[in-house]
Amino acid sequence: MADYFPPAVRRHLSALRMLLVLTVITGVLYPLAVAGVAQAAFHHQANGSVATQNGKAVGSSLLGQNFDLPKKNPADADEAARPDPEYFQPRPSAGSYDPLASGASNLGPNSPDLVKAIEQRRKDVAAFDGVAPRDVPADALTASGSGLDPDISPAYAYEQADRVATARGLSPARVRQLVADHVHGRDLGFLGEPRVNVLDLNRALNGLSG
C-alpha cells in the first residue's frame, strides 16, 4: 500500500516510524532499564542518599544544610538566623542552602564586598567557637561554588569540637574522637581532600549524647 504514496510521502512515513521506534527505545525502555539497575544496585544513592534518624528523614548526605536555632518569632521573615551551638556548622552558603538557589556569590577575589564578608565571618566564627580569628579555617569563611557543599575540612570540624562539647556537656576528647571517626580520606588515595560530612557527624552526635 505504501507504494501508492508519492516518494516524498513514503520518506516522511519512514521518518515517522523511525521517530516512534527511537522514542520508545530511548525515551521509555532505556530510562526504565537505567532506573531499574539503579534501584537494584544503588538504591540509597538513586533515591537521593536520604539520611534518617529515629525513622525520620533529616536531610541528604549529598546536600549541605543549616543547623540553626528555631526563630524567636516564626512570622518574622527578616529575623537573622542563629546557629545552634550544639551542632557542627557547615560552610557558608550564598544561596542559604536552598537547592533551588544553588550557586556561588560570583564575587571575585578582589571584590571589596567579598573581603568584607570574609572578615565579618572570621569575627563571627571566632566569637561563636571561642577561638582566635587566626585559627578559623578557610572553609569557614568562604562559600562553596554550589552553596550546598555537605562537607567541611577536618580542621574546621576539630575547631568546632570544644564548642559543641561545652554546649552538650560532653567531654571534648569524646567529641574530638567522634570527629576523627568521621574523617573521610582522599578518594582513591589521591583525589580531593580529606573531609567530614556535617550531616553524618551531627547524626552521630545526636546518638552519642542521646
Image (tube, rainbow, N blue to C red):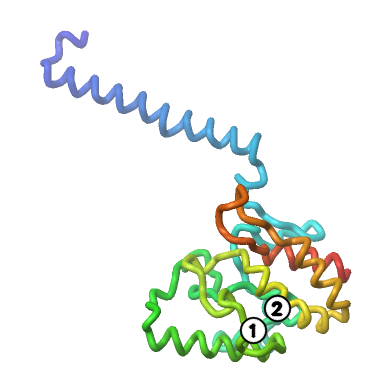
Quarter of the rendering containing residue 43: top right
Q: Is residue 78 left or right of residue 163?
A: left
Amino acid carrying mark 2 in the image: Glu
User: What count of labels does the image hold?
Assistant: 2
Q: Quadrant of the C terminus?
A: bottom right
Query: Is label 1 in a helix, a strand or a loop?
Result: helix
> Where is residue 152 shown, x and y percent of the image?
63, 68
> Where is residue 18 shown, x and y percent of the image?
30, 23
> Where is residue 96 shown, x and y percent of the image?
54, 75
Q: Is residue 135 visible?
A: yes
Query: Is label 2 in a helix, a strand or a loop?
Result: helix
In the depicted structure, whether residue 124 falls above or below residue 31:
below
* Mark number, residue 72: none
Q: Which residue is mark 2?
A: 159
* Mark number, residue 135: 1
Determine the residue positioned at 56% across, 57% down: 192
Determine the residue positioned at 67% across, 79% down: 68
Q: Quadrant of the N terminus?
A: top left
> Where is residue 189 shown, x and y percent of the image?
62, 50
1 and 2 marks in contact (CB < 8 Å): yes
Q: Is tag 1's residue or tag 2's residue first in the polypeptide sequence?
A: 1
